[in-house]
Image (cartoon, coloured by chain):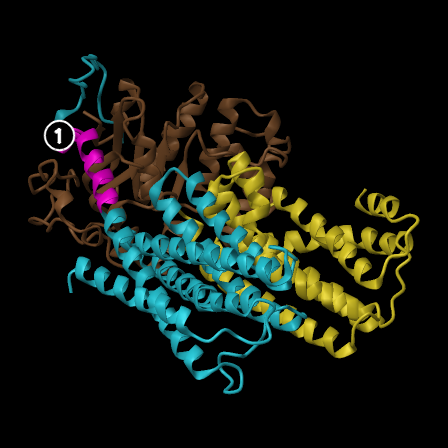
Chain colours: A cyan, B yellow, C brown
Amino acid sequence: MKTPWALLLIWLFMAVIIVAAYQAPPAEGFSKPEAARIIFFHVPAAISCIVFFGIGAWYAIRVLRLKLPLDDIKSVAALEMGTLMCVLATVTGSIFAYMQWNTPWNWDPRQTTIVAQLLIYAAYFALRGSIPDDRRRMVLSAGYAVFAMATVPFLMIVIPRVFATLHPNNTLISSAGLDPTYKKIFWSAFVGYMAIGLAIMRVRIQAGHLLYRLETERGLEDSGHIAATHRIYGADDLPLVDPAAGVAGSEGHRTG
Amino acid sequence: MTVVAMGLATANSALTPEGQAGLLWVALVFAGVTGLARGFVLEEEQGTADLLRLAARPSAALAGKMLFHGALLLASEVILIPLSLLFLGIHVEDWLIFCVGIINGSIGLAVCVTISGALVARAGSRGSLVGVLSLPVLVPMIAMAVSTTKAGLGAAAATIGWQGNVGMLGWTIAIGAAGFWLFDAIWKE
Amino acid sequence: MVSIRLQASGLGRRFGARWVFRQLDLNLAGGSVLVVSGANGSGKSTLLKVLSGLLPATEGSIDIDNVVLGSSSADVWPSADPKDPNTGIRPHPNPPPQAGEGVKESPQAREAVKESPQAGEGVSRNMIGLTSPELALYGALTGIENYRFLAKLRGQSTTVTQAEEAMDRAGLGGRGHDRVDTYSTGMKQRLRLALATQHQPPILLLDEPTAGMDDAGRKVLDGILDDQRRRGIALFATNDTNEYRYGDARLHLGV
């Protein structure tokens, strides 16, 4: 499937979901029942964030094992998408908090951990920016990405469940939690988010690939005619005179 | 110094055990992260890291630095913990949980600090990045350590304390194992 | 003469976008000394670091007695006819690629098949000795402490007497128990030579070993090179045309 067609399809799919989201009945029990529809956009963003961080870590492990630049490009693209999804989840969460509790931020455990998570991944990009050599950048940032992933289940899943939080737990899995219509729209929205994310990731990988080739190409031009990066003089050439420097070496003889 | 600052800050207010547990670990983490600059970062700065790379097995270099950070932390704890107990007026409810938690947490802290030190040193990044880069390995560790110590001070159930201890042990082993694997990959880059 | 072989094929290293050297082939047999010459910044030190395993190669592979080190590239050039055992060095058998040719390959193809760091690690540690002016010593330790610490890391046990003997051989007799901080440039260089040769490596990489050395120091170096010829291979990076005589052949970088 060619990318433009895939993108068009995803676009249509998401349009349907947005319409469907507004067709869903307002949720009872919230101070502003209409606003509860934001869960169709808030929670899928959070889940796809975890998935993209996972993809990024998977390619990071490959980088550490095989040291192929292409895996590095994929890893970065996935982590960029994960971070973007993380920001989306934070922003949509704040909007809902503002509607529901009249304050965009109340240091709920889940809000605290998502900020920590954002900080951890911001450090990933800061780390990349601070290493000039591409090979070292690739390996070190991959190592960091593996550790960053180790915190994801802890910060996004374990801690919010241990502490009292404003967030409901297990509504998605248990049958009692969510209205079936809600569930259908919700999981479709998740599929839509993933599809958009993967499509953007694909474009990023292609761009990264081109950038890498551009860099290597520039390197080739820099070293000029590669044929002359070194020259070898055999034993017969001793005493040796460096023709390029034009220095006369008069006393060259073999020791040994 | 940390203890004095904390003592001054809390001189006239009665701290909850939760606050005390948190402060105690702030001091210990501070001691651990300060040691960062004397491990791999120092080797890279003074240029002797290449000497180690030429002569030592990577695993030996990493294990050595872990022992170093552990010893450094132990030395500062011998002074830090009695002082904290005294200045902050901490009353320990369950000594077993408290002590096991501190020892467990310190070992974990030393392992985490060593590994983030290796990463930081190779990245050649100084200053602000150093603290942030050690976040991923340290955050879960500290969270569990604080909850264990809270149980030791009687502010949480004993089962939570033991859960925290098991969690810390698991995290230390996981990070340690991942660290040895990772170190082989980054040491000679 | 020992039957050690050091081979490198298609070796290349770049920093960022700049290639320091590319398509470098080496084939050295035991008993030979190769002088590496070239202007400042031509990549002598980088080549020695890559060969020692301190820096990974960007492409190509290093082969010491059939153990492959570093990244082995997918576009390694096929080896030509059997090598000449005398000079031990041959120019590249294939024409180098035109600029731009390599760019058409995918990054994967370019950048290496899997390597075996485990196997390579032990080899580089036990078989290679490196001295370089950039190599720092532990200034807070004495010369003898530096010597014994490194020996221990290399899995050898040395007594103080053995370390003192090594100091004497390096011409540091009497100063072995002083802190390295107090050493002069030449003395540090002597200590580096002692450290690089303490495990009697079959491959000795000398990066500007005469920097800051007096005549007596050069005599020590002469002795080390004579020993090395019996023990294996030496590479000698220098800018000084007078020092070309140390080699059986010369590799000139950065023409």
* Position of residue A66 measured from the top left corner of the image (x, y, whole percent): 31, 58
Considering only vertical position in the picture, is B10 above or below B99?
above
Residue A20 sits in quarter: bottom left
| The magenta segment | A210-232
Quadrant where the N terminus of chain C is found in the figure: top left
Instruction: Report the residue marked by disc 1.
Output: A225
Residue A233 on image: x %, y %: 15, 29
Image position of A125 (left or right of B13): left
Taking the magenta stretch, the answer to whether it contains residue B123 is no
Q: Nearer the viewer, residue A212 or B108?
A: A212
Taking the image as shown, residue C241 lies to the left or right of residue A240, namely: right
Q: Quadrant of residue A58 in the image?
A: bottom left
Residue at x 39% of width, y 53% of height = A80
Magenta segment includes A227? yes
Is residue C61 visible to the viewer in this orientation of the structure? no
Left or right: C172 with respect to C240?
right
Q: Amino acid at mark 1?
A: His
